[in-house]
Image: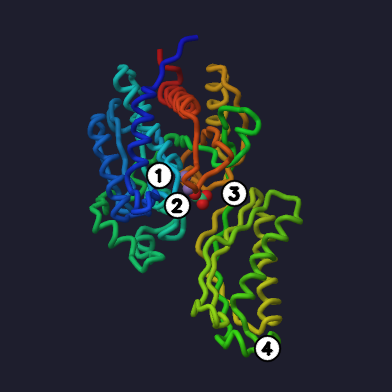
Amino acid sequence: MSHRSIDSARLLVRIAELGEIGRDAEGRLVRLAASDTEKLGRDRFVAWLEDAGLDIAVDRIGNIFGIWNAAGVGEKPIMIGSHIDTVINAGIYDGCYGVLSGLEVIQTLKSQGFEPSRPIVVAAFTNEEGVRYAPDMMGSLVYSGGLDITTALKTMGTDGTVLGDELARIGYAGPHAPGFMTPHAYVELHIEQGPVLEREGVSVGAVENLQGISWQKVTIDGDANHAGTTPISMRRDAGYAAARVITFLRDRAKASNTPTVATVGCIAFEPNAINVIPSRATFTVDLRDPDEDRLKEEETALAAFLDLLSSDEKVSISVERLARFEPVKFDQAIVRRIEAAARDRGLACKRMTSGAGHDAQMIARMAPSAMIFVPSRGGISHNPKEFTADTDLVAGANILLDVICGLATGKRPE
Ligand code: GLV
Ligand code: MN
Ligand code: MN
């Protein structure tokens, strides 16, 4: 069977070009949500949408939509999406690959005279990473009605900025109400960001579920005192108490024999001086598990440990919830379409669970959704070493093309 194909060179050049936008003085890629560097990425994306002749819409939370309205208004669109914000010192593929492939699929179909039965839309959702503003997946969460827009726009960032002000400042506080288009179906193409596909020599992941995510911020208060004169038995050491939480989480996850993962990714001590016992430790906890009951058990175990720690170390502890998302099951019919598309192209495909959070888990609240994964070399992501081979990128985008054609017509392109 002969297959239509996306323009691989155009896709790869755009991925590389977007990957150069937002480099800091040390060459690190940093495009945090609604920042100046992210504005530059947004502007480039919008210029590509214009070049492709798409209608552009921006909603109040700054989500950008490129709309191919070939079939006229009235029908719910097929939506393809992901994000173009990044973590600190990011790789170039996370999120951007899905957004640019969505644009590529639409541009390909448009230039080939394909006649979809409904509009096809590519979306770049605001603040997927959640590095600057919590929770993560915020743009798609607001879009799907899981968080009200007023609360979201008031979110204070790690740098003291307010999201709504920053969106207005960079020119991306759009007029549309979040949720203004309800997708008929939503598909997200993403690098796996884990080791499974590469290890098993499989080119395509048909993602059927996504694990639950719990983000908390823990603050431990003790007493600052002299590092040389204060006997160990007399210390209220917030730094030591934080270290005990970190080892507790790791030891527990390791001993559990389950897929539970636990990470302390941010930590700060006060006053943060070499010869002063920390009076305060503030750190984040990221807990994930594909099973909701187990995720709850992990949260309960952490709370019990914090109680014990507070009396053991004579410190006071407070906890703030930053994000909490239950595990999500994706739409089986779309998952089967992904498997069928891979089979038709002679590519090995595997059903899998997503370890990372994605906009698809939010849009799944409002529309049948699923994801396509391609391999990540060494399973590395959120790191400049993140890499996916061009052949895998192109293969994934062509699977997306097939799936979108099927959804938009019930058949493949000629
Ligand atoms: C999003 O990148 C996540 O933290 O899973
Ligand atoms: Mn991502
Ligand atoms: Mn990410």
Mark 2 or 4: the one toward you: 4
| Residue neighbourhood size for the residue with mark 2, other residues' Cα within 10 Å, grouped as few (<14), some (14–19), many (≥20) | many
Circle 3 — which element? loop
Nearer-the-camera pick, 412 or 166: 166
Measured Cα–Cα span from mark 2 to mark 4: 43 Å
Say few, some or many: other residues with alpha carbon within 10 Å of mark 1 (under 14 / 14 to 19 / 20 or more): many
Q: Which structural element holds mark 1?
A: loop
Label 1 – label 2 distance at C-alpha: 8 Å
Query: Label 1 sits on what residue type?
Result: His
Q: Estimate how packed mark 3 is, as few (under 14), some (14 to 19) or many (20 or more) residues with alpha carbons within 10 Å.
A: many
Q: Amino acid at mark 4?
A: Pro
Question: Which residue sits at x=51%, y=36%?
Answer: 371
Say which label, 3 or 2, has the lower sequence index.
Answer: 2
Q: Note whether 83 is above or below 119 in the view shown.
A: below
Q: Is the residue under label 1 in contact with that under label 4 (CB below 8 Å)? A: no
Report the Cα–Cα distance between label 4 and label 1: 51 Å
Residue 242, quarter of the rendered image:
bottom right
Callout 1 touching callout 2 (CB < 8 Å)? yes
Identify residue type, mark 3. Pro
Q: Which residue is mark 2?
A: 129
Say whether disc 2 or disc 4 marks the residue closer to the N-terminus.
2
Circle 3 residue: 327
Residue 83: which numbered mark, if any?
1
Q: CA distance from mark 3 to mark 2?
A: 18 Å
Percent across and percent down for residue 60 are 30, 53
Q: Under 8 Å from ligand 3: the CB of mark 2?
A: yes
Question: Is disc 1's CB within 8 Å of ligand 2?
Answer: yes
The span from disc 3 to disc 1 (Cα, nearest Å) is: 20 Å
Total marks shown come to 4
The residue that label 4 is drawn on is: 231
